[in-house]
Amino acid sequence: MYIASTDSTNNLMRASYSDREDLFTIRTDFQTAGRGQQGNGWESEQGKNLLFTTLLRGWNIPAAEPFVLNEVVSVALYRAVVPLLTGYHAERLSIKWPNDLYYADRKLAGILIENTLQGSQVNCSIVGIGLNVNQTIFLSSAPNPCSIAQITGTEHAIEPILNAFLCQLQDLHRWLCSGEYDAMCKTLHADYMNCLYRRKGFYLWQEREVSLAPSMPQMQHEAGQFMARIEAVSPNGELILCTETNEKRTYHFKQVRYVL
């Protein structure tokens, strides 16, 4: 479904179309109140970028491990975009935890997933994505946006990118349902980790909160900057870091950030 303009495709999906079939999609050319994670805004010049929301229904994802959906969606988007960067250092494309798409140290896409639970499973998920395609001038205070056009030096048709993403999403869904779920999830997680931004080496981090995740209440230290590498991402999406002194630290989203 295409609509020329709306406040937010996620809001529109939730208000009017949340009872539709799996993979029902709303695309727009302009959002007056586009949203990112935790209320952040999303800048997009009218008609220049891919802005859409897809409804996922009946995927039988356990409510205790909803991060599988983050991995499915971000890996599908990565696979849809990477062919467009052939010849333009496609190896610089990555997934920044938990699910942004980055090219080198610049943000190419954002993903916002809103889940509705029913019993022990995720009943449906509203997946909003903003992918910078043809915009070349960014006016907001966002620190590091970039677009596919900036990388390649040419404009790209928007609709085929959406179709490629939906095909990747369908393929991953069929694959997850084709065999043993746990084994498939492990393979998907390995793919996600292989695509992860700064997945190797030590980098500078900044804690955003003094308290760590409840799973590690025994750790006491002052909040601040520290060097660490990514050790793992847990099934519920927690980021596990290992410092230069071999100290393990676990964080929820927004508790820690890269220093770029």
Image (cartoon, rainbow, N blue to C red):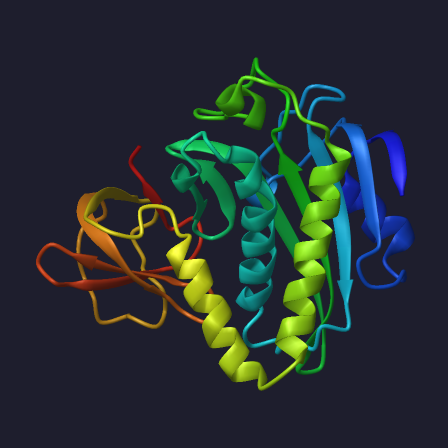
Residue 236 visible somewhere in the drawing: no
Q: Residue furthest front?
A: 87
Q: Residue furthest left?
A: 245
Q: How far across and how far down the image is residue 156, in percent?
A: 67, 26
Q: Is residue 140 above or below residue 39?
A: above
Residue at 51% in and 34% down: 85
Q: Quadrant of the N terminus?
A: top right
Toward the viewer: 150 or 138? 150
Q: How far across and how far down the image is residue 142, in percent?
A: 49, 25
Q: How far across and how far down the image is residue 196, in percent?
A: 39, 52
Residue at 75% in and 46% down: 163
Residue 148 located left or right of residue 30: left
Residue at 88% in and 37% down: 2
Give residue 40's quadrant in the image: top right
Residue 55 located left or right of residue 99: right
Residue 163 visible somewhere in the drawing: yes
Toward the viewer: 4 or 249? 4
Residue 158 located left or right of residue 97: right
Give residue 250's quadrant in the image: bottom left
Q: Quadrant of the C terminus?
A: top left
